[in-house]
Image (tube, rainbow, N blue to C red):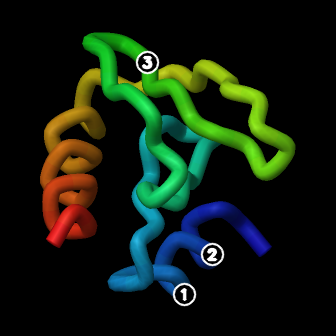
Amino acid sequence: STLKIIETELEGKGFVRIHSAYLLNVKYIHLIKQRDVEVWLGDGKCVVLPISRGRRNNLILEYKKNLQ
């Protein structure tokens, strides 16, 4: 499968495309910065992933939706 197909299958389930190579479950977001996002992993570690300029606004919208 391509990431585009997986993205379509997960639409509306809290996942958002943040970069051409990354699909992210927004419930694990720790911090959204200007060009990257910090994400908590299952083992308690935090990783930093890049955000594409064109995908940042959509990330913020999806994150806000999942806060409710």
Residue 53, above or below 55? above
Q: Which residue is mark 3?
A: 36
> Where residue 63 appears, x then y in whole percent?
26, 54
- Looking at this view, is 58 or 47 the one in front? 47
Mark nearer the viewer, 2 or 3: 3
At label 2, counting other C-alpha atoms closer than 10 Å, the crowd grade (few under 14, some 14-19, many 20 or more) is few
Instruction: Indicate the position of residue 13 as horizontal and vertical percent values.
Output: 43, 82
Q: Do the residues bearing badges 1 and 3 touch, measured as CB atoms within 8 Å?
A: no
| Residue at horizontal 42 percent and vertical 26 percent from the top | 51
SS at badge 1? helix
Quadrant containing the N terminus is bottom right
Q: Residue furthest top?
A: 34
Mark 2 = which residue? Answer: 6
Residue holding disc 1: 9
For the residues labelled 1 and 3, the Cα–Cα distance comes to 24 Å
- Callout 2, which amino acid? Ile
Q: Secondary structure at mark 2?
A: helix
Give the residue displayed 52% in from the left and 60% down from the top: 25
Query: What's the residue at 68%, 24% (across, down)?
Result: 47
- Dot 3 crowding, Cα within 10 Å, few <14, some 14–19, many 20+: some
Sooner in the amino-acid sequence: mark 1 or mark 3: 1
Percent x, y of residue 27: 46, 59
Q: Quadrant of the C terminus?
A: bottom left
Residue at the image point whose x is 34% and y is 84% from the top: 12
Q: CA distance from mark 2 to mark 3?
A: 22 Å
Residue density around tag 1, few if under 14, some if 14–19, many if 20 or more, within 10 Å: few
Horizontally, residue 57 falls left or right of residue 52, namely left
Q: Are marks 1 and 2 in contact (CB under 8 Å)?
A: yes
Q: Is residue 65 above or below residue 21?
A: below
Type of the residue with mark 1: Glu
